[in-house]
Image (spheres, helix red, strand yellow):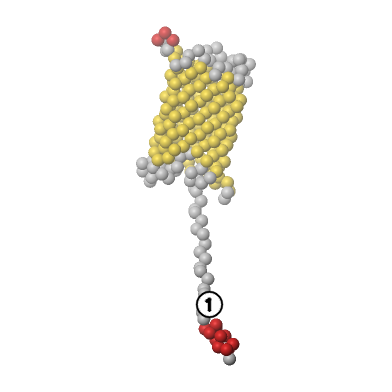
Amino acid sequence: MIALLLGAIFAATPLPMPSPVYPVATPPPEPNHVTIDVEQSFLRTSGYEWEQGRGTSTNVALRYEFQATPKARFANALHWQRESSTYLPGGFPKRWWFDYNEIDDQFDVELGRPDLPLGVGVGYYDYSTVYDFTNTYNLRGFGVGIDRWADYYTPRSFYYSAWYYPDIRGGQLEAGAYAILRAEAGVNFRPNLTSPWNFRIGFMSDTWFAKNAFATDSGFNGPYVGLSYWH
């Protein structure tokens, strides 16, 4: 009798329902992006026989970020740069030996958050034509680097990059050979988050380490201002 009564009570007691399981929301994938940067630098140069050269650098960069697979995202950046410097021996302006055009291509594998990626990659540089008073020649070579791009989803963000080219040289016999370290850091401003336009301020530095008797430790550095289009 007691067993029947306990069975009836157990049968009448509703069983607890399991809590509903909701699927974890998956954030939408980061779209592909195109970025165009235009920067104007004001340089202080050093090396060779003159320590207080002055120069300018105009830089234009086109970068494309794309999702290759669900877990692999890449970026490819093509740069064009125009460098020129002068010094004043006896008050008369004369072209300094930093006078060249440069084209480079950098391919990055993106790491971390897709909206604020860190890129590590390889690059190819072509400097032409370097002028050193007695010779003109091209310098070419490969390097490795790291990039932290700006966060374009915020009104203000920091960015930086560092690239090292261990062996930059030309095919001529009497031509300089260098190891080159290029670095920059700055702040990107996007006052209107619905607009693709940004402006930025930063500081760039190039250091050339001589690797043969035809080269001299040299470099240039200075601030820059820039305009950026991001879509």
Query: Camera-side residue: 70 or 153?
Result: 153
Label 1 Cα neighbours within 10 Å, binned few <14 / some 14-19 / many ≥20: few
Q: Which image quadrant for residue 171?
A: top right
Tell whether 175 sits left or right of 187. right
* Residue 195 makes an appearance in the image: no
Q: Which residue is most to the top?
A: 90
Rendered residue at 39%/42% (across/down) = 155
Badge 1 marks a residue whose secondary structure is loop
Q: Is residue 174 above or below residue 42?
A: above
Q: Which residue is most to the left?
A: 191
Query: Camera-side residue: 120 or 132?
Result: 120
Rendered residue at 46%/37% (across/down) = 159
**Image x and y of residue 108, in percent:** 56, 38
Tell whether 214 sits left or right of 91. right
Q: Is residue 8 above or below residue 141?
A: below
Rendered residue at 44%/14% (across/down) = 87
**Image x and y of residue 12, in percent:** 52, 83
* Residue 71 makes an appearance in the image: yes
Identify which amino acid the numbered label 1 is placed on: Leu
**Image x and y of residue 142, in percent:** 60, 30
- Quadrant, the N terminus: bottom right
**Image x and y of residue 100, in percent:** 50, 21
Rendered residue at 51%/51% (across/down) = 29
| Residue on which the image places disc 1 | 15
- Quadrant, the C terminus: top left
Q: Which residue is most to the front?
A: 2
